[in-house]
Amino acid sequence: MPRLAPPLALVALALAGAAYVASLQADLAGARAEALTAKADAAGKAAAIAALEAEAVATAARTRTTAAAHARIRRAPASDDGPVAPVLRDALEGLRP
């Protein structure tokens, strides 16, 4: 039995090493999959952020345009006013901030 001990120990060591390598390969595959998922998630979030920023720019432009129109209407002289249907006047006055 003493003569078989070193070869058996080497076989056991080789099997343990193979199992360890297989475990490392599985971990590496998992890490690569997680990295791909994270990249896809980051790309999706970047697209969402870009869309939100574009919407914010558009909203700011609409707000400036609306404010300019309101200011122009307020600056207009009373002589520019004409008769307005009561229902329209009530609706327009209800929109004032």
Image (cartoon, grey):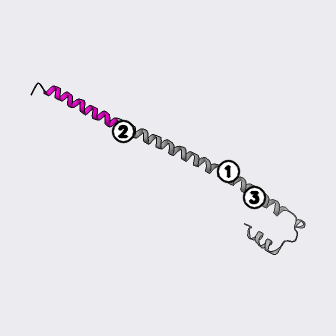
Position of residue 6 relative to residue 89, above or below, is above
Position of residue 24 relative to residue 87, above or below, is above
Q: Residue at x 38, y 36 (%)?
A: 28
Judged from the image, the secondary structure of the residue bearing numbered disc 3 is helix
Q: Which residues are magenta?
A: 1-24
Which residue corresponds to mark 3?
66
Query: Quick check: 54 left or right of 95?
Result: left
Specify which label sits upstream in the sequence, 2 or 3: 2
Which amino acid is tagged 1?
Val
Residue 63 in the image: state x and y as whole percent.
Answer: 72, 56
Q: Residue at x 75, y 58 (%)?
A: 66
Judged from the image, the secondary structure of the residue bearing numbered disc 2 is helix
Which residue corresponds to mark 1?
57
Q: Is 88 or 63 nearer to us in this picture?
A: 88
Q: How far is disc 2 from disc 3 in space, using C-alphas?
A: 58 Å
Quarter of the image where one finds residue 86? bottom right
Residue 92 in the image: state x and y as whole percent.
Answer: 77, 69
Residue 57 in the image: state x and y as whole percent.
Answer: 67, 50
